[in-house]
């Protein structure tokens, strides 16, 4: 048998190595960012461009524990195309938990066999998605811009966001609710914040800069403003919408 034995991700994560770490959605987001910036060029966004390796479905050539994966990420594999990286242990760990999330979502993915053209029609029609989302200048800016979503998110992650928007709310997509000392209630998508001010895009697509000293109340909304489409789209329709969104890669989107 070839010594490049593929170890299933389910076995990899059966080892309780994560007990020594604590992590949350912010760590997964950091891992996704590092993966896209450093790993996609060789492994591809779905992690399946290297022969015999399928990170999106948890298949590796060499690994028996989570620590093994971290060590490979940091130190590379001598004699192969896998180079070392100047990551801290924590950064390598966030990439590992992102890979775990990729594998967890893969089994529920509806990306295979979808028709992007039908998906676009559903997105713009039945789904009413352009009321919140913008794609290449078309649609509203109150929700996240999806022009490059196919580069930024995997199909399984896109599907999860459609059927269960509250499952993963990325830091860049948080909504806020504020009340001024004068009684005005303002809600919208958080763009920037610092010690003294908050910048949001409100529900009327107006850019608002609020001084914290002028606010009576201010809170980040825990749930996503996006509704679930779990019972609004059939399985086939969901597959088509995911296929369409997965095809969006900025200026190359059709």
Image (tube, rainbow, N blue to C red):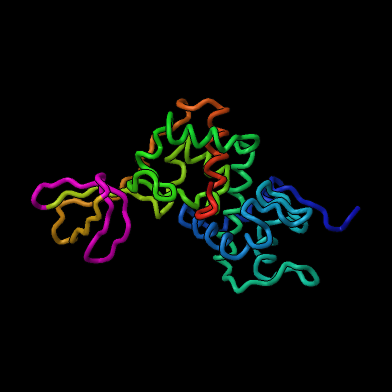
Q: As displayed, is residue 166 above or below residue 42? A: above
Residue shown at 57%/39% (left/top)?
243
Q: As displayed, is residue 143 above or below residue 113? A: below
Give residue 206's position: percent from left, percent from top. Answer: 24, 51
Q: As displayed, is residue 101 above or below residue 233? A: below
Instruction: Give residue 157's quadrant in the image.
Output: top right
Which residue sits furthest right? 1
Residue shown at 77%/58% (left/top)?
62
Q: Say whether residue 106 is left or right of residue 54.
A: left
Q: Nearer the viewer, residue 250 or 80?
A: 250
Q: Nearer the viewer, residue 170 or 143?
A: 143
Give residue 77's position: percent from left, percent from top. Answer: 75, 68
Residue shown at 45%/48% (left/top)?
146
Q: As displayed, is residue 252 above or below residue 74? A: above
Give residue 118's position: percent from left, percent from top. Answer: 54, 32
Give residue 10's position: percent from left, percent from top. Answer: 69, 45
Q: Say whether residue 190 is left or right of residue 232.
A: left
Image: magenta residue range: 181-205
In the image, is residue 182 part of the stretch drawn in magenta? yes
């Amino acid at each position: 048998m070839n010594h490049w034995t593929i170890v299933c991700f389910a076995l990899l994560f059966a080892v309780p190595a994560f007990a020594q770490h604590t992590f949350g959605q912010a760590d997964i987001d950091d891992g996704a960012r590092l993966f896209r910036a450093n790993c996609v060029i060789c492994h591809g966004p779905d992690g399946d461009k290297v022969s015999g390796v399928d990170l999106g479905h948890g298949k590796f050539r060499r690994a028996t524990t989570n620590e093994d994966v971290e060590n490979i990420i940091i130190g590379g594999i001598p004699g192969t195309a896998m180079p070392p990286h100047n990551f801290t242990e924590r950064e390598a760990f966030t990439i590992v938990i992102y890979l775990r999330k990729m594998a967890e979502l893969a089994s529920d993915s509806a990306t295979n066999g979808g028709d992007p053209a039908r998906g676009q029609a559903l997105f713009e029609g039945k789904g009413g998605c352009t009321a919140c989302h913008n794609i290449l200048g078309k649609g509203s800016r109150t929700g996240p811009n999806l022009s490059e979503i196919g580069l930024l998110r995997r199909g399984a992650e896109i599907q999860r966001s459609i059927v269960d928007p509250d499952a993963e709310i990325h830091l860049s997509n948080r909504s806020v609710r504020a009340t001024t000392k004068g009684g005005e209630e303002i809600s919208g998508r958080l763009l920037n914040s610092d010690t003294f001010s908050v910048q949001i895009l409100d529900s009327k697509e107006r850019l608002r800069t609020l001084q914290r000293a002028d606010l009576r109340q201010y809170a980040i909304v825990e749930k996503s403003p996006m509704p679930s489409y779990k019972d609004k789209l059939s399985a086939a329709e969901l597959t088509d919408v995911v296929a369409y969104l997965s095809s969006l890669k900025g200026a190359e989107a059709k």
